[in-house]
Image (spheres, grey):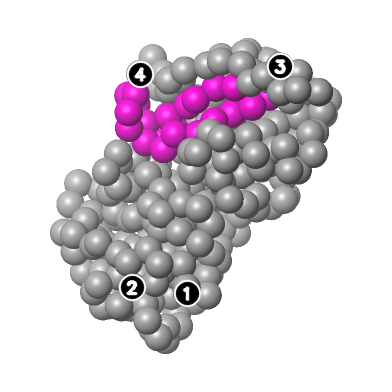
Amino acid sequence: MKIPFYHVDAFASRPFEGNPAAVCPLECWLPDGTLQAIAGEHNLSETAFYVPRGSHYELRWFTPEVEVDLCGHATVASAHIIFDVRREIAGNRVTFKSKSGELGVDKTAENGSSLYALDFPARPPEPCPIPAGLSQALGATPQSVLAARDYLCVFATEEEVVALTPDMAKIAALDRFGMIVTAPGKDCDFVSRFFAPAKGVNEDPATGSSHCTLIPYWAGRLGKTELFARQRSRRGGELWCKQRGDRVSIAGRAITYSEGTIELET
Protein backbone atom coordinates (compact mmCIF):
# COMPACT_ATOMS: atom_id res chain seq x y z
CA MET A 1 0.00 0.00 0.00
CA LYS A 2 1.30 3.45 -0.92
CA ILE A 3 0.14 6.57 0.92
CA PRO A 4 1.15 10.08 -0.14
CA PHE A 5 2.43 12.38 2.57
CA TYR A 6 3.37 16.03 2.78
CA HIS A 7 5.56 17.86 5.29
CA VAL A 8 4.12 21.35 5.76
CA ASP A 9 5.29 24.30 7.89
CA ALA A 10 2.09 25.92 9.20
CA PHE A 11 1.60 29.40 10.67
CA ALA A 12 4.72 30.32 8.70
CA SER A 13 5.56 32.50 5.70
CA ARG A 14 8.92 30.82 5.08
CA PRO A 15 10.37 27.31 5.42
CA PHE A 16 11.92 26.35 8.77
CA GLU A 17 9.47 28.53 10.69
CA GLY A 18 6.07 27.87 12.22
CA ASN A 19 4.94 24.39 13.17
CA PRO A 20 5.75 21.38 10.97
CA ALA A 21 2.97 18.85 10.37
CA ALA A 22 2.68 15.76 8.24
CA VAL A 23 -0.47 15.42 6.14
CA CYS A 24 -1.59 12.06 4.77
CA PRO A 25 -4.55 11.94 2.36
CA LEU A 26 -6.36 8.59 2.58
CA GLU A 27 -9.05 6.91 0.52
CA CYS A 28 -10.47 5.17 3.60
CA TRP A 29 -9.55 4.89 7.26
CA LEU A 30 -6.75 2.57 8.29
CA PRO A 31 -6.67 0.85 11.71
CA ASP A 32 -5.99 3.23 14.59
CA GLY A 33 -2.77 1.39 15.43
CA THR A 34 -1.47 1.97 11.91
CA LEU A 35 -2.31 5.68 12.05
CA GLN A 36 -0.56 6.00 15.40
CA ALA A 37 2.49 4.11 14.12
CA ILE A 38 2.75 6.43 11.09
CA ALA A 39 2.56 9.48 13.37
CA GLY A 40 5.25 8.00 15.59
CA GLU A 41 7.47 7.36 12.58
CA HIS A 42 7.07 10.95 11.39
CA ASN A 43 7.87 12.14 14.93
CA LEU A 44 6.41 15.60 14.29
CA SER A 45 4.13 17.29 16.81
CA GLU A 46 1.12 16.27 14.68
CA THR A 47 0.29 14.07 11.74
CA ALA A 48 -3.08 14.76 10.11
CA PHE A 49 -5.04 12.17 8.16
CA TYR A 50 -8.07 13.03 6.05
CA VAL A 51 -10.65 11.08 4.05
CA PRO A 52 -12.99 12.74 1.49
CA ARG A 53 -16.71 12.26 2.14
CA GLY A 54 -18.55 14.02 -0.67
CA SER A 55 -19.13 17.62 0.43
CA HIS A 56 -16.70 17.43 3.36
CA TYR A 57 -13.64 15.65 4.71
CA GLU A 58 -13.16 13.61 7.85
CA LEU A 59 -10.03 14.73 9.69
CA ARG A 60 -8.02 13.20 12.55
CA TRP A 61 -4.78 14.25 14.26
CA PHE A 62 -2.11 12.22 16.04
CA THR A 63 0.94 13.24 18.06
CA PRO A 64 3.77 10.68 18.19
CA GLU A 65 2.03 9.27 21.30
CA VAL A 66 -1.75 9.83 21.17
CA GLU A 67 -4.72 10.93 19.07
CA VAL A 68 -5.94 14.44 19.97
CA ASP A 69 -9.37 16.02 19.64
CA LEU A 70 -8.26 19.32 18.08
CA CYS A 71 -5.18 20.63 16.27
CA GLY A 72 -4.89 23.97 14.55
CA HIS A 73 -1.61 23.88 12.67
CA ALA A 74 -2.23 20.44 11.14
CA THR A 75 -5.68 21.65 10.03
CA VAL A 76 -4.06 24.65 8.33
CA ALA A 77 -1.58 22.23 6.74
CA SER A 78 -4.40 19.94 5.54
CA ALA A 79 -6.29 22.86 4.00
CA HIS A 80 -3.09 23.98 2.27
CA ILE A 81 -2.68 20.54 0.70
CA ILE A 82 -6.34 20.31 -0.35
CA PHE A 83 -6.57 23.85 -1.77
CA ASP A 84 -3.16 24.65 -3.19
CA VAL A 85 -1.12 21.47 -3.62
CA ARG A 86 -3.53 18.72 -4.70
CA ARG A 87 -6.24 21.22 -5.79
CA GLU A 88 -8.96 18.81 -4.76
CA ILE A 89 -11.77 21.34 -4.50
CA ALA A 90 -12.92 24.56 -6.14
CA GLY A 91 -14.00 27.51 -4.05
CA ASN A 92 -12.49 29.03 -0.95
CA ARG A 93 -13.94 26.99 1.92
CA VAL A 94 -13.37 23.44 3.06
CA THR A 95 -15.34 21.69 5.80
CA PHE A 96 -13.87 19.04 8.07
CA LYS A 97 -15.74 16.70 10.40
CA SER A 98 -13.67 15.91 13.48
CA LYS A 99 -13.78 14.83 17.11
CA SER A 100 -14.39 18.52 17.90
CA GLY A 101 -17.34 18.74 15.53
CA GLU A 102 -17.51 20.58 12.23
CA LEU A 103 -14.53 22.81 11.45
CA GLY A 104 -14.37 25.18 8.50
CA VAL A 105 -11.29 26.68 6.86
CA ASP A 106 -11.60 29.73 4.61
CA LYS A 107 -8.88 30.61 2.13
CA THR A 108 -8.11 34.18 1.07
CA ALA A 109 -5.34 35.48 -1.17
CA GLU A 110 -3.09 38.10 0.38
CA ASN A 111 0.16 39.51 -1.04
CA GLY A 112 0.50 36.65 -3.50
CA SER A 113 0.06 33.87 -0.92
CA SER A 114 -2.84 32.09 0.73
CA LEU A 115 -4.08 32.79 4.23
CA TYR A 116 -6.06 29.95 5.83
CA ALA A 117 -8.56 30.95 8.53
CA LEU A 118 -9.71 28.24 10.93
CA ASP A 119 -13.25 28.37 12.32
CA PHE A 120 -12.72 26.71 15.73
CA PRO A 121 -14.67 26.47 18.99
CA ALA A 122 -13.75 28.98 21.69
CA ARG A 123 -12.48 27.54 24.97
CA PRO A 124 -12.65 30.47 27.41
CA PRO A 125 -10.50 29.97 30.52
CA GLU A 126 -11.73 30.34 34.07
CA PRO A 127 -9.62 31.59 36.99
CA CYS A 128 -8.25 28.87 39.25
CA PRO A 129 -5.80 28.61 42.15
CA ILE A 130 -2.18 28.04 41.20
CA PRO A 131 -1.89 24.23 41.27
CA ALA A 132 0.68 22.65 43.52
CA GLY A 133 3.91 22.18 41.61
CA LEU A 134 3.08 24.53 38.74
CA SER A 135 5.56 27.28 39.64
CA GLN A 136 8.26 24.67 40.23
CA ALA A 137 7.49 23.13 36.84
CA LEU A 138 7.84 26.48 35.09
CA GLY A 139 10.71 27.76 37.21
CA ALA A 140 8.74 30.99 37.73
CA THR A 141 5.47 32.10 39.31
CA PRO A 142 2.88 33.60 36.95
CA GLN A 143 0.78 36.64 37.81
CA SER A 144 -2.37 34.55 37.45
CA VAL A 145 -3.49 31.09 36.38
CA LEU A 146 -6.64 30.17 34.51
CA ALA A 147 -7.76 26.89 33.00
CA ALA A 148 -9.79 25.39 30.18
CA ARG A 149 -8.46 22.26 28.47
CA ASP A 150 -5.00 23.59 29.33
CA TYR A 151 -3.61 25.70 32.12
CA LEU A 152 -3.17 29.34 31.06
CA CYS A 153 -0.34 31.04 32.93
CA VAL A 154 -0.22 34.82 32.55
CA PHE A 155 3.05 36.76 32.94
CA ALA A 156 3.72 40.49 32.94
CA THR A 157 6.22 40.68 30.08
CA GLU A 158 7.22 38.99 26.87
CA GLU A 159 10.77 38.64 28.21
CA GLU A 160 9.55 36.46 31.08
CA VAL A 161 7.76 34.13 28.68
CA VAL A 162 10.80 33.83 26.41
CA ALA A 163 13.14 33.18 29.34
CA LEU A 164 11.19 30.22 30.77
CA THR A 165 13.03 26.88 30.87
CA PRO A 166 10.34 24.50 32.13
CA ASP A 167 10.87 21.10 33.73
CA MET A 168 9.00 18.91 31.27
CA ALA A 169 8.64 15.95 33.64
CA LYS A 170 6.96 18.19 36.20
CA ILE A 171 4.67 19.74 33.59
CA ALA A 172 3.71 16.25 32.41
CA ALA A 173 2.69 15.36 35.98
CA LEU A 174 0.08 18.17 36.14
CA ASP A 175 -3.59 17.38 35.59
CA ARG A 176 -4.30 19.18 32.30
CA PHE A 177 -3.64 18.36 28.64
CA GLY A 178 -0.97 21.04 28.38
CA MET A 179 0.25 24.41 29.59
CA ILE A 180 0.00 27.78 27.86
CA VAL A 181 2.18 30.68 29.01
CA THR A 182 1.36 34.16 27.75
CA ALA A 183 2.07 37.87 28.14
CA PRO A 184 1.47 41.14 26.28
CA GLY A 185 3.59 41.41 23.15
CA LYS A 186 5.94 44.17 22.07
CA ASP A 187 5.10 44.13 18.34
CA CYS A 188 1.84 42.19 18.60
CA ASP A 189 -1.17 41.97 20.90
CA PHE A 190 0.11 38.97 22.84
CA VAL A 191 2.74 36.26 22.82
CA SER A 192 2.58 32.68 24.01
CA ARG A 193 4.35 29.35 24.32
CA PHE A 194 2.77 25.91 24.67
CA PHE A 195 3.97 22.74 26.38
CA ALA A 196 2.33 19.29 26.30
CA PRO A 197 5.02 16.77 27.32
CA ALA A 198 2.49 14.22 28.61
CA LYS A 199 1.11 14.00 25.05
CA GLY A 200 4.49 13.58 23.35
CA VAL A 201 5.11 17.26 22.56
CA ASN A 202 7.54 19.07 24.86
CA GLU A 203 7.19 22.50 23.26
CA ASP A 204 4.91 23.01 20.29
CA PRO A 205 6.29 25.62 17.87
CA ALA A 206 2.95 27.23 16.82
CA THR A 207 -0.32 26.00 18.26
CA GLY A 208 -3.81 26.64 16.90
CA SER A 209 -5.75 24.87 19.65
CA SER A 210 -4.13 26.90 22.45
CA HIS A 211 -5.46 30.04 20.77
CA CYS A 212 -9.01 28.76 21.33
CA THR A 213 -8.27 29.77 24.93
CA LEU A 214 -5.86 32.65 24.32
CA ILE A 215 -8.20 34.58 22.02
CA PRO A 216 -11.16 34.82 24.47
CA TYR A 217 -8.77 35.78 27.28
CA TRP A 218 -6.96 38.53 25.38
CA ALA A 219 -10.10 39.78 23.59
CA GLY A 220 -11.68 40.34 26.98
CA ARG A 221 -8.57 41.83 28.54
CA LEU A 222 -7.77 44.19 25.65
CA GLY A 223 -11.36 45.00 24.70
CA LYS A 224 -10.90 44.13 21.03
CA THR A 225 -12.06 41.29 18.80
CA GLU A 226 -9.23 41.25 16.23
CA LEU A 227 -5.74 40.44 17.46
CA PHE A 228 -2.33 39.60 16.04
CA ALA A 229 -0.31 37.02 18.00
CA ARG A 230 3.17 35.56 17.95
CA GLN A 231 4.17 32.22 19.39
CA ARG A 232 7.63 32.70 20.86
CA SER A 233 9.04 29.23 20.36
CA ARG A 234 12.46 28.74 18.78
CA ARG A 235 10.86 28.46 15.31
CA GLY A 236 8.22 31.12 15.95
CA GLY A 237 4.72 31.46 14.54
CA GLU A 238 2.34 34.19 13.34
CA LEU A 239 -1.42 34.02 13.92
CA TRP A 240 -4.19 36.43 12.96
CA CYS A 241 -7.03 36.00 15.44
CA LYS A 242 -10.68 37.00 15.80
CA GLN A 243 -13.15 36.50 18.63
CA ARG A 244 -16.59 35.49 17.31
CA GLY A 245 -18.82 34.66 20.25
CA ASP A 246 -18.53 30.96 20.98
CA ARG A 247 -16.16 30.52 18.00
CA VAL A 248 -12.73 31.88 17.14
CA SER A 249 -10.97 32.49 13.85
CA ILE A 250 -7.27 31.60 13.74
CA ALA A 251 -5.52 32.37 10.46
CA GLY A 252 -2.06 31.65 9.17
CA ARG A 253 0.02 30.78 6.14
CA ALA A 254 1.62 27.46 5.20
CA ILE A 255 4.60 26.29 3.15
CA THR A 256 5.17 22.82 1.69
CA TYR A 257 8.62 21.63 2.75
CA SER A 258 8.65 18.15 1.21
CA GLU A 259 6.44 15.38 -0.13
CA GLY A 260 6.81 11.66 -0.59
CA THR A 261 5.22 8.25 -0.32
CA ILE A 262 4.72 5.92 2.63
CA GLU A 263 4.99 2.25 1.69
CA LEU A 264 3.18 -0.25 3.93
CA GLU A 265 2.90 -3.99 3.65
CA THR A 266 -0.67 -5.14 3.13
Horizontally, residue 232 falls left or right of residue 207, namely left
Q: Nearer the viewer, mark 4 or mark 1?
A: 1
Q: Name the secondary structure under disc 1.
A: loop
Residue 61 x/y as whole percent:
63, 43
Position of 20 relative to 176 (above/below): above
Residue 54 x/y as whole percent:
83, 25
Q: Residue at x 60, y 59 (%)?
A: 246
Residue beneath disc 3: 2
Residue beneath disc 4: 111
Residue beneath disc 2: 137
Three-letter residue code for mark 1:
Leu
Part of the protein shown in magenta: 5-25
C-alpha gap between disc 2 and disc 4: 42 Å
Q: Name the secondary structure under disc 3.
A: strand
Three-letter residue code for mark 3:
Lys
Q: Are marks 2 and 1 in contact (CB under 8 Å)?
A: yes
